[in-house]
Image (cartoon, helix red, strand yellow):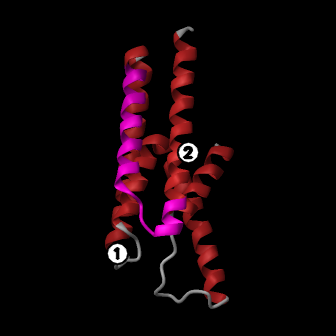
Amino acid sequence: MNRLSNLTVIQTAMTLIFFCGLGILAVTDIKRKIIPNKILVLLLLFWTAGVSMLLILQTEFGLTILFESLAGGTIGGIIFLLCYLLSKGQLGAGDVKLVFVMGLYLTGERIIGAVFYGTLICCVYSVLLLIRKKITRKDGVPMTPFLYLGTIITYIIM
């Protein structure tokens, strides 16, 4: 295998691991209303391993991915940290950590789209539940499934 195909294999593996981990987190958030740190740490370790391999195989490309990933993590993390601080408990700390990890995988290019579409779908769903009186304004809605959908939409259109 040449270096280019090695890079493609690594990036594909990272994407598959990310989507599997995010899917598990979405189901867990629906069922238990929690985002387990263990899964976030595993995703962080897989990201670190993947980026390290990219740096070894193709330093310049690996550095580009590293900086784009750190930008994505920072952007997503700061946006959700501000929302967490302003939401008075409606957004959990797990959501902040999740969006930081998502940003590492999605990079700055995709994290904003994933958060935008995920939040938009969550808002529409929440309004429908409010109209149907299935929830009150004080009830929380798990965010991870919507971030997962937002990520899928972002991957499709970008």
- Residue 123's disc is none
Quadrant including the N terminus: top right
> Badge 1: few (under 14), some or many (20 or more) residues near its Cα, within 10 Å?
few
Point out residue 138 in the picture as x, y percentages from the top left corner: 46, 87
Labels 2 and 1: the sequence-earlier one? 2
Point out residue 122 in the picture as x, y percentages from the top left corner: 58, 70
Local SS, label 1: helix
User: Mark 2 belongs to which amino acid?
Assistant: Phe
* Point 59% across, 78% down: residue: 126
Rendered position, 86 above or below 40:
below
Residue 13 on the magenta span: no
Residue beneath disc 2:
19
Residue pushed farthest top? 2
Residue beneath disc 1:
86
User: Mark 1 belongs to which amino acid?
Assistant: Leu
Residue pushed farthest left? 85
Residue 42 on the magenta span: yes
Point out residue 145 in the picture as x, y percentages from the top left corner: 56, 61
Local SS, label 2: helix
Rendered position, 42 above or below 117:
above
> Which residue is at the front of the view, 116 or 14?
14
**Range of residues picked out in magenta:** 27-55
